[in-house]
Image (tube, grey):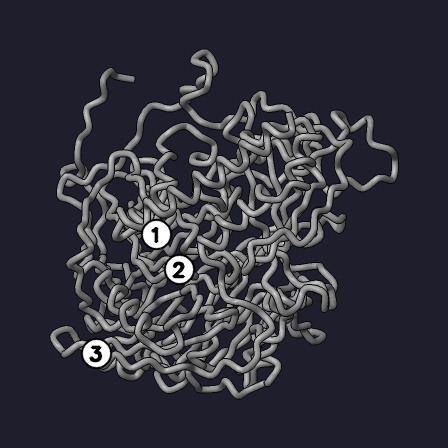
Amino acid sequence: MEARNLLRVLFLFLSVVLVLLFTWVHLPYAPPYANELLDCATNSPWCTSKNRLQSKQSELLREPRNPTRHHNHASDTPHHPLDPLTIQELNKVRSILSSHPLFISSTYALHSVDLEEPEKALVKKWKKGDQLLPRRASVVARVNGNSNVLTVDLSTGQVTVCETGSPSGYPTMTIEDMTTATLAPLANADFNRTIIQRGIDLADLACLPISTGWYGKSEEKRRLIKVQCYSKKGTVNFYMRPIEGLTVLVDLDTKQVVEISDKGSSIPIPKAANTDYRYSVQELHQIMNLLNPISIEQPKGPSFSIEDEHLVKWANWEFHLKPDARAGMIISRAKVRDPDTGELRDVMYKGFSSELFVPYMDPTDAWYFKTYMDAGEYGFGLQAMPLDPLNDCPRNAHYMDGVFASADGTPYVRSNMICVFESYTGDIGWRHSESPITGMPIREVRPKVTLVARMVASVANYDYIVDWEFQTDGLIRIKVGLSGILMVKGTAYDNINQIPNGENIHGTLLSENVIGVIHDHYVTFHLDMEIDGSDNSFVKVNIKKEQTSAGESPRKSYLKAVRNVAKTEKDAQIKLKLYDPSEFHVINPSKKTRVGNPVGYKVVPGATAASLLDLDDPPQKRGAFTNNQIWVTPYNRSEQWAGGLFVYQSQGEDTLATWSHRDRGIENKDIVVWYTLGFHHIPCQEDYPVMPTVSSSFDLKPVNFFESNPILRIPPNVEKDLPVCKPTSSV
């Protein structure tokens, strides 16, 4: 029996090698693992569960249902200084590097190939019709075991090696890193023996590559990853069937197993029944048709346009939008039109998800290291999935593809990665009705229609829905939704009555033998604000209680606003407090309204959470950018990633917290605001086997930016302007 299973492993390994070689020859624009993954046209859980393994990539190469556009990217050309690199440009980068001395006769992998954006001053001066600014690529490459940052000039072919110091961490993993890491245990006889002893067929294995974090000297000077496996027998939702306590430590460079830890042999694998979430497998008598179909129709078409693939124009807004392998989606040059002057006014130079921090609250051997930093370790954009028309995005949405480079530099297309659409949910833009006692029969109401740019990253089990929503009143709402599947822990318990008093199971018993482990999610946003120009200030407006003096008023107290302009970075390190409320303004002190107020925008927090971990806990050192909810730093083009440039196995010496500790001046300067949106998640049974979406958001809202209500003069809806959809039967 054991020999038969070992032969299966050998056959599987050789099959993968042959498929990789076949793919290399036959797919010019796909990464070299593509053909292996085309098998995901089947209903294999490797395809449908959106994990960090090969299935992730199959989704990149398959068209989503009812694709709305077919775009041939081979002939794309850039039109704007911030446009992402095209297929032609990525191929040119690959060609230039292949003949560079650093890469000749070397073992290397390209961990990122992105546009090196021109200097801000040059971009701001550029106008459509001007000659395009010089195009350069920023490349992060591992060459012969060393990390390098290079700039490639696409016009001259010149390659410049950039100085990065001696960072403790490593670059974002490539998809190839993740894929090959999960295959490494299968080549190890001890691992295979352990799986067989657990009573699991090797053909039923599904494994995940899990970043290790950093916990001491023993983990330095080599790239390590931990692999944990699941049984996919009987379900596509293998996440609910963990092989608990089995952890394999793998060297990412040699692909060799370093260590196997097996401390859960007595824990049963949870059952597969009732874990499959696919609509196609639900019993017909269980289908819940709760709603009649609903769709927003636009007979005249949408009100937005997208010029040259990336410049979005809608109502009074204009901004540049592009996919990004690490950030997912980048909004740049956001401007809003002034209703009085007709002028497009600067609001934000650049905004994006800079880093995520997802620590699980279980200190045991198989869980303590699960403290993910999804952008810097896995690539938030690399994990983006093609959006599903009519379900992820409504009718009349526009879809945007991503074009990225695989580890050898070969370009490939991530189809339908971003969608842009108008949203109307029945919300009200503004209204007022007069009371009958005034004798004035007035009722004025304006509907609220917004524009949404959306992307979804499926980082293994979790799905992150990121929306940038623009309103006609000048407000920008940034929203994060969490859905997908919990990362669960196997247990011997199948009822809470069996759990001894005092035992901490680190979560909630969700089903028989399944614990949903408590965890947090933090998403830190980089917001390079530009309120009518680059030189801005950050103002903390404290709301203070003031006592009245004796005989002054029948009132004993009232509230007043106390404005404090932040001089240095430490003045702008903000921990939100319910009973010490403040507003947080970004103003242009040199531009004022007609009555003298400085124009500005304010950061308006929504529901959020703060990290409660010890500041000296190794994960929190690496995730120190979550120590505050708001930070403000002077603009520095090297400070974009809140967890540092090289996050993987970093020790936390190059984070937003480190930069801000310098306490640089920020008054009336080009400043960047950083906001962290947080969630505490105590799992519950409603999260099983797949989670209903939970969302939170924050706003960037005009504060004395306009002279008055900017949507005062928009018209109300009237019946004759709206499409009439005839119901199939009257209600």
Residue type at numbered disc 3: Ser
Any part of residue 598 in sight: yes
Q: Nearer the viewer, residue 206 or 316?
A: 206
Identify the residue position indicated by label 1 in the image: 31
Along the horizontal axis of the image, is 657 left or right of 17? right
Residue most extreme to the right: 501
Image quarter where the C terminus lies is top left
Residue 216, by quadrant, is: bottom right
Label ID, residue 423: none
Q: Which residue is drawn at 30% across and 79% down?
A: 118
Residue type at numbered disc 2: Ala
Q: Which of marks 2 and 3 precedes in the sequence?
A: 3
With respect to residue 572, does 266 lie above or below?
A: above
Residue type at numbered disc 1: Pro
Label ID, residue 155: 3
Q: Position of residue 63 (x, y in %)?
A: 28, 39
Q: Residue at x 33, y 74 (%)?
A: 116
Q: How far apart are marks 3 and 1 (CA)?
A: 26 Å
Any part of residue 436 in sight: no
Q: Which of marks 1 and 2 precedes in the sequence?
A: 1
Q: Which residue is drawn at 66% across and 54% down?
A: 258
Q: Do the residues labelled 3 and 1 touch (CB within 8 Å)?
A: no
Q: Residues within 10 Å of mark 2 (few under 14, many from 20)?
A: many
Q: Where is residue 249 in the image (x, y as percent from the top left)?
A: 65, 52
Residue 223, by quadrant, is: bottom right
Along the horizontal axis of the image, is 582 left or right of 716? right
